Amino acid sequence: MLDSAALLQQLPYSKPFLFVDEITALTDTRIEGTYTFRKDEYFYNGHFKNHPVTPGVILTECMAQIGLVAYGITLLPEGTDVASLKIAFTSSQMNFYHPVYPGETVKVKATKQYFRFGKLQCDVAMYTEDETLVAKGVLSGMFKIECK
Amino acid sequence: MEKKLLLTKLKAIVAPYVQNPKGLERLNEDTNFLRDLEINSANLVDVALDVEDEFGIEIDNDSMERMLTVKASIEVIEAKLAAK
């Protein structure tokens, strides 16, 4: 059974760079999660001057935290020491369709293309609460388990 | 499969991931994917997956760890093809 809180605790991020509030669905082939961009996120001061819009790199980061890191942790072999896990973001191909403003909640859906030899590649998409497509693309990352 | 043909096929597979074109021009059995071609570890996985598709074989974790040079890769491919 999905324990969103336990999974979130295993994520190697903290404020101000944690962009996951809840994991809402999880299967062998896909994951879904949500995040609400707080009105006082640090980057709104500078992106843009007098006109706060969530940066595309932050939307991509949000999708990577849910679709690669949170998902990848669930795909690791039983008994893996998650604390010693080394992760790297390795590729991003992304298109953007709709802006996300301060205070908005987004939903991220990721579907596994493959997880082989420590590399997870997923099709990812982000939607607003009313299901408007925000961004869509392909992300990949590497997971390295430290052997003692 | 003839070794020369195998080498040609392997060269075509690695080409899209190579960051050092001179290394690709000079490709030979001693070529190291990371050092000579500057392929990163994520794209090395793509090389292995493309090798699986091209030759209709399955690469296991141990073979993957060995596939760091052209020579080692050819040995892995030949062994897997022979075992088919």
Image: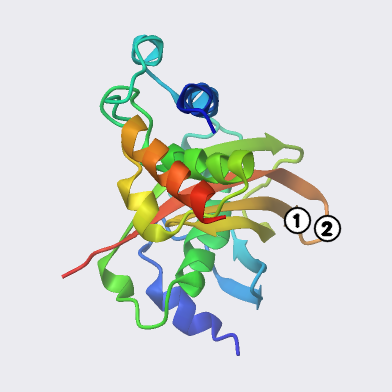
Label disc, if present, on residue A109 of the rendered structure: none
Task: Where is residue A90? Give x, y as percent.
Answer: 45, 42
Task: Where is residue B13? Give x, y as percent.
Answer: 54, 29
| Depth check, front residue: A63 or A36 | A63
Which image quarter: residue A62?
bottom right
The residue indicated by pointer 2 is: A131
Question: Subunit of mark 1?
Answer: A
The residue indicated by pointer 1 is: A128
Q: Name the kind of residue labelled 2 in the image.
A: Glu
**A20 shown above or below B58:** below
Q: With B69 as the anchor, is B44 left or right in this view? A: right
Which image quarter: residue A14?
bottom left
Count of numbered circles in the view: 2
Q: What is the residue that sits farthest to the bottom in this orientation? A: A1
Which residue appears at 35% of the width and 9% of the height?
Answer: B22
Give the crowd class for mark 1: few <14, some 14-19, many >=20 residues within 10 Å.
some
Task: Where is residue A9? Give x, y as percent.
Answer: 40, 77
> Marks 1 and 2: in contact by CB < 8 Å?
yes
Which residue appears at 39% of the width and 74% of the height?
Answer: A10
- Please determine if labels 2 and 1 lie on a single subunit: yes
Q: Name the kind of residue labelled 1 in the image.
A: Thr
**A7 shown above or below A73:** below
Which residue appears at 63% of the width and 66% of the height?
Answer: A34
Q: With B52 as the anchor, is A24 left or right in this view? A: right
Which residue appears at 66% of the width and 47% of the height?
Answer: A101
Question: Subunit of mark 2?
Answer: A
Q: With A15 as the anchor, is A20 left or right in this view? A: right
